Amino acid sequence: MKSGLLLFALILSGSIFSFYSCKRSGQQTATEETVNEHSNRTDSTSNYYIEVGQQYVNATQSVLAKNLLEAIDKDGALYALEFCNVRAHPLTDSLARVHHAGIRRVTDRTRNPANKANTMEMTQIALLQSNLAKGENLSPTVTEQSGKMVGYYPIVTNAMCLQCHGKPHVDISNATLDKIHALYPDDQATGYGVNELRGLWVVEMVR
């Protein structure tokens, strides 16, 4: 996928706390003030890590896109497939080490089996797919897991993606399709249209 052209809808969101309590006229109770302060701190922390994770994703996409464009310029989509097969994972891993973070691409419909989403990631994908079906913008989210902040960033298809991920024999040429089958015998990553959820960038950040 031509990572540098992927569109992200970055809408920062935080937890919403609702509760019932008695109020004095025109004033918040001490309990309400405490909850609101906690909510603001939670929102601020979530937004901070969403922004940091987005920076890591942007930097990784930039490097992958540069290399992928060079591959396409050299020999078209066929060579781009060779690049993705051999170099995409090592490049992503090296950038993760530079940023001292875990950076991965995952999906529910794999080309490379190494990109298979786990249970938590599948839940995030299903939620985003539901939101997309409702016509809602897709937003990144962050959760705390085992002392780490884990950000989930939607990957949405565009017209360029369809050269390798669109409809066989329609968007994908016969030669490219043959190469996909040769490199990825169990490929599940075709049949997409424009503006569909291809998967997620997952960024693990130490608190």
Image: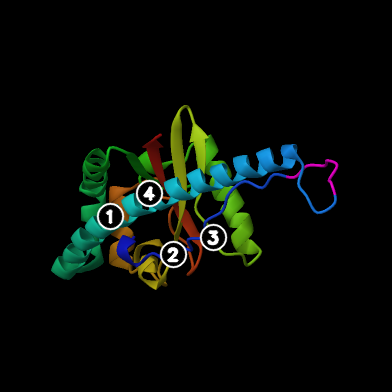
Dot in front, 1 or 2: 1
Which amino acid, by three-letter code, is at mark 3? Leu
Q: Which residue is mark 4?
A: 52
Circle 3: is it few (<14), some (14-19), or many (20+) Cα within 10 Å?
many
Q: Which residue is mark 1?
A: 59
Q: Which residue is mark 2?
A: 157
Report the front residue among 35 and 2: 35
Which amino acid, by three-letter code, is at mark 4? Val
Question: How far apart are the two marked residues, 1 and 2, measured between alpha carbons?
Answer: 19 Å
How many labels sit on residues? 4
Question: How far apart are the two marked residues, 4 and 1, measured between alpha carbons?
Answer: 11 Å
Question: How far apart are the two marked residues, 4 and 3, measured between alpha carbons?
Answer: 18 Å
Marks 4,3: beta carbons within 8 A: no
Instruction: Specify which label sits upstream in the sequence, 3 or 2.
Output: 3
Q: Residue at x 44, y 59 (%)?
A: 190
Circle 2: is it few (<14), some (14-19), or many (20+) Cα within 10 Å?
many
Provide the residue span drawn in magenta. Answer: 18-24
Marks 4,1: beta carbons within 8 A: no
Circle 4: is it few (<14), some (14-19), or many (20+) Cα within 10 Å?
some
Dot in front, 3 or 2: 3
Q: Which residue is mark 3?
A: 138
Can residue 102 be seen by looking at this rendering?
yes
Dot in front, 4 or 1: 4
